[in-house]
Amino acid sequence: MSGELSAGLEHGELNFEGALRPSRLGEFIGQAKLRKQLSLLLSAAQMQQRTPEHILLAGPPGLGKTTLSMIVAHELDAQLHQTSGPAIQHAGDLAAILSGLQPGDVLFIDEIHRLSRNAEEMLYLAMEDFRIDIMVGKGAGASSIALDLSPFTLVGATTRSGMLPNPLRDRFGFTAHFEFYDHDELAQVVTRTARLLDFGLEEPSIAEIARRSRGTPRIANRLLRRVRDYALVHDNHGDLDTVREALALYDVDEAGLDRLDRDVLFVLVERFGGGPVGVESLATSLGEEAETIESVVEPFLVREGFVLRTPRGRVAAQKAWDYLGVIKPTTM
């Protein structure tokens, strides 16, 4: 491959990454009720020439929270500033970000439930009164200086809304709850992405990818790109056989379960007899982080009826036993 062609392909891929994200609410696929609610909030603020209320985006990963934060800024014709909870280790880090905001700016904090305690307390005052108190000096000679902030809109995103302290949650004027996508919505996502990739896909192929995408647009786009790569390398077209061969290669089965999903079910059934078992014990047995199990794997398995959450721990549902081809003991 020539250097010019290689550079061209690389440039095209970078452009594609940006093009995947819609820039307007009207271009955003799915979450119909949420979009109407958000459109009303933004339109009312613009009509009154005021800064919109703070917005909390809550839901499983991959459903479009980051994309929607960018859309909020675009719809308001405002500057977007992005950071994340783990990146803000000290209150001073947050103070530096807040003091640099201009009137009407949008501040997006991903994984906001992971903010440090000191940063959270600073954020309370900033969200409510557009003001922060900065400590100057140390020890007995330390003093507090009030610093006024420009009016801004905070957009926080979280996959674990239950971990947000009530004082922080209550300061958001609007909470958007993301739902998993249905197959028709995912088919629209796949169709749009395939068009941007200039990759011809037959209708059955689109439906197959959508069906295996776990109700998540991010996964749908990832699977589509793997199918595209497979077809390119094997000089195939986007027919149904190609889709099935590509997804089989990447361990995504017909139910949309991947290797980690199957490992969770196997350990739950074979090692713990179907449960109940705590998520920490389950994660340790798999060599994974408990947060990965809770935020990435578990929502889909619970939604699809493979796993049940109980006060005593996780329990394998009958569907999990049937999926693994294991007979459930009658004593359970």
Image (spheres, rainbow, N blue to C red):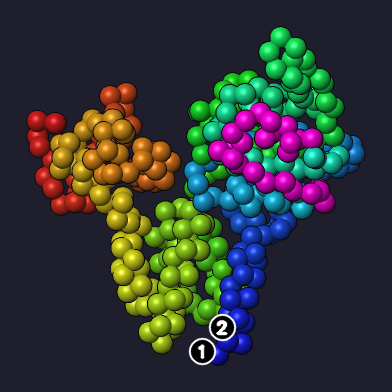
Q: CA distance from mark 2 to mark 1?
A: 6 Å
Q: Earlier in the sequence, mark 2 or mark 1?
A: 1
Give how far across and how far down residue 7 sits, in percent: 60, 81
Frontmost residue, 271 versus 25? 271
Can the viewer see residue 192 in this picture? no
The disc labelled 2 sits on which kind of residue? Ser
> Which residue is found at the position 44% from the left and 65% from the top?
223
Give how far across and how far down residue 103 sits, in percent: 86, 39
Frontmost residue, 93 versus 70? 93
- Give the SS element for disc 2: helix
Give how far across and how far down residue 248 sits, in percent: 30, 68
- Circles 2 and 1: CB atoms closer than 8 Å: yes
Give how far across and how far down residue 282 sits, in percent: 27, 37
Taking the image as shown, residue 191 lies to the left or right of residue 306, namely right
* Image quadrant in which the C terminus is located: top left
> Which residue is found at the position 61% from the left and 87% from the top?
4
- Give the SS element for disc 1: loop
Residue at image mark 2:
6
| Residue 129 located within the stretch drawn in magenta | no
Can the viewer see residue 166 in this picture? yes
Q: Residues in magenta? A: 75-99
Q: Is residue 200 above or below residue 19?
A: below
Q: Which mark is residue 1?
A: 1
> Which residue is found at the position 77% from the left and 53% from the top?
74
Taking the image as shown, residue 230 lies to the left or right of residue 311, namely right
Mark 2: few/some/many CA within 10 Å (<14, 14-19, 20+):
few
> Which residue is found at the position 67% from the left and 35% from the top?
93
